[in-house]
């Protein structure tokens, strides 16, 4: 196996060395591709030092040296990859010694186009653990049982009961299969672009389960994770989910091979998030309205009859 590991780098000077070295422990890793996305910290210099230290580490940036987000940054890595297989790793995460154990066996079968596994969690500080333990705990992010490839897409859509999830950190793809479907990350999505990518990939490719009961990679949790802030509702999750499901719905509408019942399911999920977001915006809009127009009522208690009627 010749694996290209793609690591998008943004604001990760503290963590990227660990990520790189966790990938280099495997002789199957042909190259580690760092794509630096105009970090505000010293990450670019750390990446340059890593290329000098390790011959298998390659460094790229966007043509304009600008910041383009995780999706566009991973796309650069896909374009530059020279290995026969592609794996992904976030710069603040890391691989465990069993990362490609199942892959080495499964990819001997030419019909296997991708393999996914489980990831664990590591808290980089006590503060991060205190903030986010209620979100992640010590649980695995995994698919709960072995499934055939045709069950993965409906499983991720929650159409097959309790399926579970897998992370892009635990996904390995046959490069020829990825090229066949011309599948890249959506660059206009600022969040959840990896989940949207996994949805489409699971529809087009035959993805097989690897190690599901043990972590093969670790999600690093710290105070500055953007996606962690979404999961913890520090960033409004309703609005980000609306954008995500709007994108999935748009893709499904234009993909003629998707069955009508699946398209209808996706449309219903999209509508449910849109309604939830509208309710959220209405509720907080009413709070702002009362703060400016009926402040005395709020001072007298949130149980003012007019306020309650408008808000709920």
Image (cartoon, grey):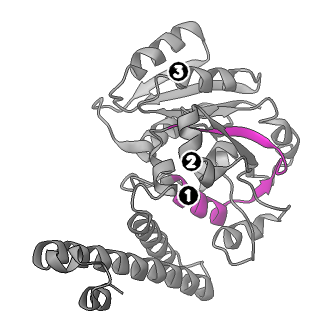
Q: Is residue 181 left or right of residue 158?
A: left
Mark linked to residue 132: 2
At numbered mark 1, what does the secondary structure look like: helix, strand or loop?
helix
| Image coords of residue 126 (percent x, y) | 58, 34
Left or right: 287 as drawn, with respect to 138: left
Residue 151, which numbered label?
A: none
* Image quarter of residue 285: bottom left
Q: Is residue 35 visible?
A: yes
- Boundaries of the magenta span: 194-222
> Which dot marks residue 195?
1
- Residue at coordinates 72% horizontally, 63% vertically from top-left? 164
Residue most extreme to the top? 53
Please rate how many residues cluster around mark 1, counting C-alpha atoms within 10 Å: few if below 14, some from 14 to 19, many from 20.
Answer: some
Foreground mark, 3 or 1?
A: 1
- If the image is split into quadrants, where does the N terminus sit? top right
Q: Which residue is mark 3?
A: 58
């Amino acid at each position: 196996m010749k694996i290209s590991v793609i690591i998008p780098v943004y604001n990760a000077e503290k963590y990227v060395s660990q990520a790189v070295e966790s990938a280099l422990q495997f002789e199957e890793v042909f190259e580690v591709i760092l794509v630096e996305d105009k970090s505000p910290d010293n990450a670019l210099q750390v990446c340059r030092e890593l290329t000098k230290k390790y011959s298998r580490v390659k460094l790229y940036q966007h043509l304009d040296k600008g910041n383009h987000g995780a999706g566009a940054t991973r796309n650069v890595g896909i374009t530059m990859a020279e290995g026969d297989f592609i794996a992904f790793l976030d710069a603040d995460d890391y691989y465990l010694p069993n990362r490609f154990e199942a892959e080495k066996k499964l990819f001997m079968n030419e019909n296997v186009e991708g393999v996914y596994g489980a990831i664990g969690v590591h808290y980089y500080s006590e503060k991060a653990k205190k903030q986010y333990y209620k979100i992640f705990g010590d649980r695995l992010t995994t698919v709960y049982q072995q499934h055939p490839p045709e069950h993965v897409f409906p499983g991720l859509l929650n159409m097959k009961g309790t399926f579970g999830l897998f992370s892009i950190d635990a996904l390995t793809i046959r490069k020829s299969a990825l090229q066949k479907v011309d599948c890249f990350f959506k660059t206009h999505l600022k969040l959840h672009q990896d989940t949207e990518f996994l949805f489409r990939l699971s529809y087009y490719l035959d993805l097989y389960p690897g190690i599901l009961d043990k972590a093969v990679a670790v999600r690093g949790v710290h105070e500055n994770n953007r996606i962690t802030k979404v999961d913890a509702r520090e960033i409004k999750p309703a609005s980000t989910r609306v954008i995500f499901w709007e994108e999935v719905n748009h893709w499904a509408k234009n993909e003629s091979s998707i069955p009508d019942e699946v398209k209808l399911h996706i449309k219903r999920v999209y509508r449910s998030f849109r309604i939830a977001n509208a309710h959220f915006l209405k509720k907080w809009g009413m709070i702002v309205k009362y703060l400016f127009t009926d402040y005395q009522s709020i001072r007298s208690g949130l149980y003012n009859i007019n306020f309650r009627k408008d808000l709920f």
